Image (tube, rainbow, N blue to C red):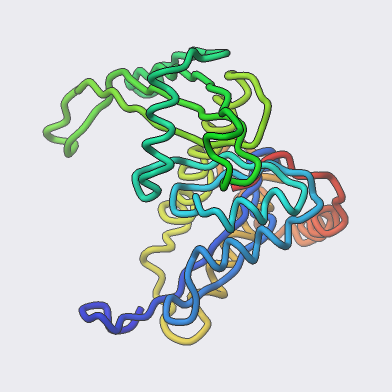
């Protein structure tokens, strides 16, 4: 990043297409904020995925008419987060949910590391006249997440209750359980990709600065994550140990990766 304390700041970031099914990055695009926006880069990647018959999950930033139209035009489907950045759409979703009856629902509970979470998913069909300008829109999905979790610093951690409501728009005719699994898979990107790069591979503290070095090393890290997933190991450190000095094994993995023609089930 340059000019971090002024309005003239410029930084390089990477937009990735991550496969829920395989656990690796299948496409990426490096961008500079002065030359392009994340929305434009995602639109470009969406075009590249045309004809793959995949489900693309994206955050609320990409709840754009043009982006969703490109997904449908390319023969794919979408699940997109709804927030108040699209206020009219958000109000329409709220009105539908408050006045209609859900056609299906699913509830799943879990307890992990002392955190208890229940996810209650409901789906509501969209009347064709309600959202005519949103390409392919068929369902509003509502996910209520509630339970208990630890908050605060290690020395002052306390168990608190939480109750959150999330809205999604989709072009799919799925059951509530299928939507719940796909939405859960989207948020697992934080643990399976971003956390691995930031913590295990120490990306935030990279000493390589300037020029193309940060972007190039970011791509190498993503490639390492993909190779680790192909090794089917339990943890990333275990994969690094198995891959150390194993040139023949890595070459075979690279060959499999480049020659794979299996369709990607779900992308984000």
Q: Which residue is at 58% across, 19% downward?
A: 176
- Residue at 36%, 45% (x, y): give it: 87
Where in the figure is residue 65, as x and y percent of width and height? Answer: 55, 53
Query: Seen in the image, is 115 located left or right of residue 109?
Result: left
Give whichever of 144, 228 is nearer the camera: 144
- Residue name at image x 73 percent, y 53 percent: 73
Q: Which quadrant of the figure has residue 11? A: bottom left
Residue 119 vertical position relative to residue 79 in the rendered view, above or below: above
Residue 213 coordinates in the image, percent (x, y): 51, 80
* Location of the N terminus (image quadrant): bottom left
Q: In this view, does 88 lie to the left or right of 36?
A: left
Give percent across and percent down for residue 8.
29, 84
Name which residue lies at 39% across and 44% down. Answer: 88
**Relative to 71, does residue 37 appear above or below in the rendering?**
below
Q: Residue furthest left?
A: 156
Q: Which of 177 and 127 is in front in this view?
A: 127
Task: Tell me residue 152's x, y (percent).
Answer: 17, 36
């Amino acid at each position: 990043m340059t000019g971090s304390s002024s309005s003239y700041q410029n930084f390089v970031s990477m937009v990735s297409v991550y496969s829920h099914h395989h656990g690796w990055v299948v496409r990426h695009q490096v961008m500079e904020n002065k030359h392009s926006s994340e929305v434009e880069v995602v639109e470009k990647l969406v075009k590249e995925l045309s004809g793959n018959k995949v489900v693309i999950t994206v955050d609320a930033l990409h709840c754009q008419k043009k982006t969703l139209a490109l997904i449908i035009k390319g023969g794919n489907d979408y699940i997109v987060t709804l927030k108040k950045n699209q206020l009219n759409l958000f109000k329409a979703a709220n009105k539908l949910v408050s006045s209609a009856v859900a056609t299906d629902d699913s509830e799943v509970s879990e307890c992990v590391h002392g955190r208890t979470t229940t996810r209650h998913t409901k789906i509501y069909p969209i009347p064709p006249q309600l959202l005519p300008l949103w390409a392919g829109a068929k369902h509003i999905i509502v996910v209520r997440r509630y339970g208990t979790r630890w908050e605060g610093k290690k020395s002052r951690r306390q168990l608190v209750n939480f109750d959150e409501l999330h809205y999604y728009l989709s072009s799919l005719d799925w059951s509530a359980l299928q939507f719940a699994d796909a939405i859960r898979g989207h948020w697992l990107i934080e643990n399976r990709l971003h956390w691995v790069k930031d913590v295990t591979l120490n990306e935030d503290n990279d000493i390589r600065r300037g020029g193309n070095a940060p972007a190039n090393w970011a791509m190498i890290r993503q490639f390492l994550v993909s190779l680790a997933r192909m090794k089917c190991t339990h943890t990333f450190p275990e994969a690094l140990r198995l891959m150390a000095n194993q040139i023949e094994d890595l070459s075979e993995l690279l060959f499999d990766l480049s020659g794979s023609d299996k369709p990607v089930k779900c992308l984000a």
